[in-house]
Image: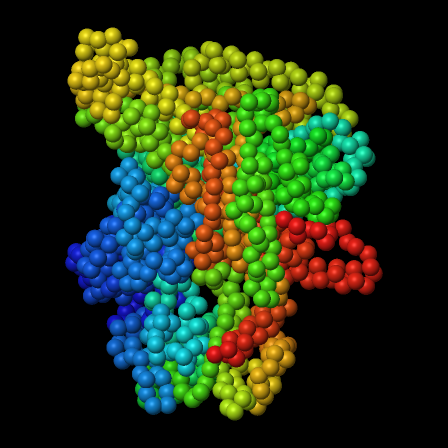
Amino acid sequence: MIVEHTDLVNIALIVNGRPIEHVVPAATTLQHFLHHIMGYYDVKFGCGEGVCGACTVLLDGEAVASCLMLAAQAQGRTVITGAGLKHAATAAAQVSALQTQLVDREAFQCGYCAPGMVVKAAHYVMSDNRPDPMAIRRALSGNICRCSGYQQIVEAIVAATTGDAPLGTAKSRDDLRSKVEGTAHYPTDRQVENALVGSILWSEWPSARIQNIHTEAAAAVPGVVAVLTCRDIPGQNLTGTTIFAADQPLLVVDRVRSMGDVVALVAAHTAAAAREAVRRIQVTYEPLPAVHDVLEALAPDAPKVGSRGNVIAQFTHVKGNTEVALRQADTIVEGTFRCTMNDHACMELEGGTGWWEGEDMVLVVPSLTPHVARAGVARALKLAEERIRIVTPRMGGSFGKYLIPSVEGYLALLVQATGNPVRLVLERDEILARRVKRHPFLGQYRLGLRRDGTFMALDADVFADAGPYVSLTPTVVSVFADEIAGAYDIPTLRVRARGVLTNNLLPAPMRGYGSQQINFGIESIVEKAARTLGMDPAEIRRKNYLRTRTDGQGRPLPESQIALTGTLDRVLQRLGPRPQPPVGWLGGRGLATIKAKYGYPYGMRDRFVARVSVNSDGRFLVESDVPDSGTGITAGVTRLVADHLGLDEIPQYEVSQALIDDPSGFLIGHGHRPSRMRAMAYRFVERLQTVQAGPALAVTVRLEAWRLVKLMRLIAWPVNLLNSAVNWAKARLFPFGLDSYIPRTSGSRGMFMVGRAALNAADGLRQVALTVAASSLGLPSEQLQLTGGGVQQRSEPSHRVTWAQLVREAGGTLAALGEAHLPPGWLLDPATGNYIGSVDYMYASHGCDIAVHPETGEVQILRYVACQDVGRILNPETIRGQIIGGIAMGLGQALWENIVMDHGRVQTVGLHDYLVPTSLEIPRDIEVELLESADGLGPGGAKGVAEAAAVAAPSAMAHALYDALGRQPSHIPMTPEDIVEAMLGAKGDEEERRATGVSRQGSPPGGKGV
Amino acid sequence: MLLAGGTVVVPEIAQQGDARLTLIDIGSIAPLQTFIQADGYLQIGATVSLARIASSPEAQPRYTALAQAAATVGNPNVRSAATIGGNVAFRRPVADLPPALLALGAEVLLYGLDGLESRPVLQVITDGVPAARLITAVRIPHGSGQRSAFLKFAWRQASGQTIVNVAVALCVVGGLIAGPRLAIGGLCRHATRVLAAEQALEGRPWSDDLMEEVARIAAAQVTCDVVGPPSEAYRRRLVMAGVRRILADVAKS
């Protein structure tokens, strides 16, 4: 076949058993054809270069990446997609068993990769079918899963090949089943007829003044409907999280501060026209000096990134007299450690579709904070918040990214300007080069110790690279200050944590934000201390672990356990004796113990609301305003409610628009909106509280001299008092939460906060049901009890009413609203009056054995073991999946995932270059052991889970490299080339030592005694 | 432009959806999909997939290096579409089949209006496919008693972009190495043979010292003109390690 590539070609093929004939432009890929044109939304797009496998389909029985072939090449062939596997003639029963196993083992989380992965897995089961985990991993290596770490997927396939009986939990996972069967839809799946294509013109310089922008040539491109610049914003030109500062323009005016700034927007009838228009927008820049390093940005003569100084957040954490302690210390160990940027690498592209529905604007976009997204859009469009609906049933990964605004503001502007539906989805390279990243970290440490390894003092300066705008960086910096000592009891602390503006990309929260970087810092200096003193790394940790747990106010909890020693002991026991590395390779063992926040309250009273209801069919529904990004909320919360009420069936979960409209639950709870006066007064108090962060920070920014602490304390006292007074007043006068300003699910709290609210609602529902049943049966409610099917008399079970009867009796739906609160955090530093701090912590130890090739820097992970105190095990497979997924991401950040920056410009292109681990990278059998201290803040004493593993894994790997090389990694990721360089450095030292007979600090002979 | 597996061309077309070009799909031409085991040579049709080469019994054990190279390209989904002809025509340092084909002494069959001609693989990967010619097959001579091996370094095991790849083929006659060919890719625009290293192997008996010596020669002599990262010094270290490993592999087989 020979065609001009713009020609239309007529193709005929069979998709999922259905013959299709269609005329398409010759350049249409098979993925685009199936997904966009034919509506097979299970054929996802992830990378467009055959790396991620989200678009995998069976083509005449062979698994192929449908983004790598043209639709025309499928002429006359048979295609089977993830949702159509039952049409795979040979093995419908096998496929069905496979799907059940995958659901049963909670193999997927966000589920975006699932249809492609299931196609590949089905192909394996139908063609190879050996229960060999390594063969399965090889087969799956072209299908990337960002969430799961692959282990449960492999286990499910093994079980399917051996015909093992399912664990029997699958029926309860409607949500997961829809992902596995390819019927779950994501924001970028949404197609609206005649939608225009949106496109973004990004900044050309990391720092420049804009002299002028000409859009005439762009607007003249045929097919272009709108070209927008900052002049076209009807409302406020503001985006970003505005908790701490309102400094990020939606579209830049006369200044660009990073490569991630947006200059102009285009909407056109075709993608080609939109691209051409973006190219034709003429912008004249006057490049300005830029700064790309936090230390350089601190210099007095450094270019100013924002309108004020470059330090935008500073938290001090002071305990005891560090100077005296350091003088008394036998040894002082110093070190500087860095974490570079990471991309969230969500498998779904960033973006969505928006349109008008009558007076309302509907935006289908990824978001973890629909209220914040909506408020931002309303502000920019000058519309009432109620007229904007953010629809996010689920999203293809988030890992914290969507806690801050994404592209919804741009999408909304284009929808408003054109009056048309618009689809705006960023390309993978735009996401890598322009969008948010994990906060880069730099920590300078001095740790004072006694000869026996007891920690005496920590003096540390730690920095977060804030990129060009304030955003959420102050919270990350506060986490740095709060968790600076990690899992250890260090009697004196003198810590200064700062967030510093640079012209790099804007950072965003990412799995264990703040905690990961700061634990890497403290773990690194502790490891260095162990090797300096010649101590066993396990021993020095045991000696210095925290011995008391504190509550949300920083008060010790005498009755509670602290699981640190327990987790380490379990890890060591499971690791057993050191394995023998292959000949010519160096062996290394790394241990890490972490303490990481969950339930982060942003220093304010925090409130979550959930609603549990039952309808006249007796079907239960749990609602909240928290979308599920794959953290297991949907399954976890519904299962909790089912267990709590003893239901036979697992309820449905829905993200409720009513709760997004009114996150306080007031409307739902009272049946009417709060009065206007009351709402206004409440907003005023909210504002009062949020702006408090401003003055408090301004105070701390100037806190350079340590001796001023007492004076600062005095100054901060009124701020402090005001904060408490406002909190007190709010809690009593207003029954609403502060939620509209607060990211909802950050810090692993989604599940445990929504879970608690849902349990509270379930209790309410139980009361209502008993009351209704009492009047219906004519019995006192004390004699009644709930059963799976309804309510019955304790002594005489035949006296009973079903749920459906109860609902009829009540004349509609039976429902109850529940809520959960977090305490407002604790006082981090008396000098600043900042309450911002965490309320409880996760504790975990990880250990790994690796082999490193000294000549090439290749790393083999021989064993990996993790032990975590999860409070209470609500759902073991979900927890295991979250932990293994966290380890996979953490290992990626330690070894492979490298955003290469050159003067603020990202050099990493595509997912072939940004190395998200495949199934071959992740160790085969990660062992996870869970401890139950049952004293977390979540339902039944559960704790947050998801982040701790991502926090611990990079440190465990870095220490294993240290052990193997005799040289400490000073940064992550450590590429093979970095490892070789470290190795050569160590060799150099050894030669030097042999030559001079002097021993270097940091590589003692006893260092390998784990 | 010719379109076979499409794994390289299609993403480019999708990216620049507005460039004008003419596409000719050769994927369904049956004679290009054949695997011919003839007297004296193995002939692989241009559109035979890498997945098939990687798992084909015909390629084992005589053409081990080719099967190993095919098995390291991209990932399983890519290999089931990517073709041998495409990989030969893919003129990038990261191509994985050229070193193996160089070591195995392969020839490329080209079809044009003036008929069929055969050219050494080196010429095709150096100068590209001549105008108005179509690769129809790759022909690999039997080389009786020949052993071969291939190894690739990438920073990820699947979908890993090649940093350095190495391939060797040789015979052992009466305990002495005969007709060795050693080829290396990843360091310059196309894979090359390292003649100095081959000479060092020729006519010598196996020994650890010999392998070490040859690895050193290869690392020192191979041309490097790609710009890092990773650095040239690191790439040369990989060459050394890689050559040592494939020689050890061949010695064992």
Residue at the image position 45 percent from the left and 13 percent from the top: A734
Please provide percent x and percent y for residue A970. 66, 50
Residue A658's place in the image compared with B186, above or below, is: above
Residue A285's place in the image compared with B86, above or below, is: above
Number of numbered discs present? 0
Q: Which quadrant is home to the N terminus of chain A?
A: bottom left
Identify the colour scheme used: rainbow
Residue A598 seen in render: yes
Q: Which of A512 and A128 is in front in this view?
A: A128
Residue at the image position 37 percent from the left and 23 percent from the top: A759
Residue at the image position 69 percent from the left and 38 percent from the top: A461
Residue B227 seen in render: no
> Is A139 positioned to the left or the right of A459 in the image?
left
Q: Which of B23 and A140 is in front in this view?
A: A140
Please provide percent x and percent y for residue A516. 56, 41
Residue A188: which quarter of the image?
A: top left
Please provide percent x and percent y for residue B48. 33, 74
Q: Which of A831 and A363 is in front in this view?
A: A831
Residue A710: which quarter of the image?
A: top right
> Is B238 positioned to the left or the right of A938 in the image?
right
Residue at the image position 52 percent from the left and 80 percent from the top: B251
> Is A757 positioned to the left or the right of A916 in the image?
left
Please provide percent x and percent y for residue A242. 51, 30
